[in-house]
Image (cartoon, grey):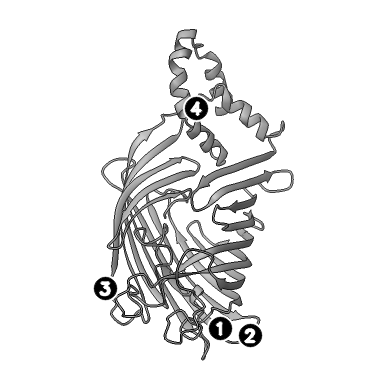
Amino acid sequence: MSDEDGLRLRRQQMPKKNTVQRIVAWPYTVVRLPFLVTGRAMGYTVTFIDDTQLFPRVKDFLTSDDGLVSLYPTASFGGRSGLTGELTFSDRKFLKQGNRLGLHTSYSVEAHQNHYARYQAYDLIGSLYLDIRGRYNVNTNEDFFGIGPDISDVKGDGDQEDETNFRHEQLGGDLTIGIRWRKFFGTEVLINFTDHTIKEGEGTRSKSTLSPDPKSPFNRENTPGLEGAALIGVGGRIVFDTRDNDFYPSKGLLAAVSATVFDQTDDSKYGFTRYNLELSHYLTLFRRGRIFAVRLLGEINTRTSDNETPFFERASLGGTGDLRGYNTGRFRDKDLILLNLEYRYPIWDAGVDQIGAMDAVLFVDIGRVFDDLMEDTFKNYKISYGGGIRARTTTGFLLRAEFAHSDEENKVLFRFEPMF
């Protein structure tokens, strides 16, 4: 008897609830319902419901009779991202087990758009794998604060609100071809093409990105790339990965180094080489579920000959993925160093059969951007810190809600993807 058959038999043998029990349980079920729907809608295992009743019906609807076709929908809503929908398709008649085709679309209340199609294939020939994605993205009012490691008063006139915004439209694709040479070691070829279109922002900022003032930090001379550019990048990546899982590790090490050369396809003004380093380490402290996680990121962008690096491709810090207490894109320059520290500990577990869990997190983010990483390497770092909660299952990540503080502001963050 398989594990699934055994679980089904145990469910059938469970005593039925009487009328009183159902009436008493009803308010609790109503309160839990939004969390249950969100959990299943995101394509992960339903963990917070009595799956002796609802879950098999949902599974039957999403899975064919022979168990070969699976369709997982995703739906979410947020003030910044707006309405989001996603479909992940897997068909073992045509695709190997574990391979996926995903379609994603989102449209926000501020007219931001993000659309992509992604195909992931594993073990194509031996240990060869493929990840390919086509994408179209529009941000109607992406924030811009100037270029430099400490842009708080870029004009020197005492005005602390020298930021502006711009409309950033991107059309492109990404291709990753990799080989796992050993259990923990692999190499990848990276190919990227993106056509960037930059226009004046549609937000509420009082200053225009396309300023005619030659003294303004936001004119074309001081901000290379305002006319947009089409860029193609070709590079490679080496990965050493001993983590126990990809989405929420409890132990192991991830070390990755990459180099990518970018050239402009529609002109010869822009060209640069990007070097990236990532080190992430996870330790279980004292007892199961208590995890100390640390991540170190480094990025260096060097110019090719006399070519420039457009401002939208420079190293950037600020936002939900790095310095959480600062606005997205708050700091931009050629290079960056970032250190993230997190202590994660469990505050709720759904049990043996229901494999959901919720963790509390305390974090500190330390980082800065540089015009030259070799100068003032250990000075003037920006710091943010805070805490939050993470909801997850053993097969996927659900969401994280965090509060972050910095010397500029306090931020409340919601994301449907892990930090690292």
Asked whether the beta carbons under mark 1 and mark 2 sit within 8 Å of each other, the answer is: yes
Tell me if 105 is positioned left or right of 221 in this view: right
| Dot label at residue 270 | 1
Q: Which residue is mark 2?
A: 267
Residue at label 4? 49
- Kindly identify which residue carries mark 3: 380
* Disc marking residue 114: none
Instruction: Say if residue 363 shows up in the picture.
Output: no
Q: Mark 3 and mark 1: span between their CA atoms?
A: 30 Å
Say which label, 4 or 1, has the lower sequence index: 4
Find the distance from the CA under tag 4 to the CA under tag 1. 54 Å
Picture coordinates of residue 207, whole percent (x, y):
45, 73
Q: Amino acid at mark 2?
A: Asp
Q: CA distance from mark 4 to mark 2?
A: 57 Å
Residue sitting at x 49%, y 86%: 221
Q: Is tag 3's residue or tag 2's residue first in the polypeptide sequence? A: 2
The quarter of the rendered structure image containing the C terminus is bottom left
Element type at mark 4:
loop
Q: Earlier in the sequence, mark 4 or mark 2?
A: 4
> At x 70% / y 44%, what residue is drawn?
91
Disc 1/disc 2 C-alpha distance (Å): 8 Å
Question: Type of residue at label 4?
Answer: Ile
Mark whose residue sits in front, 4 or 1: 1
Q: Nearer the viewer, residue 58 or 35?
A: 35
The image shows residue 374, relative to residue 22, as above or below, that is below
Residue 83, position as x, y percentages in the image: 57, 47
The CA distance from mark 4 to mark 3 is 49 Å
Taking the spot 42% from the left edge, 78% from the top edge, the residue there is 334
Residue type at mark 1?
Answer: Tyr
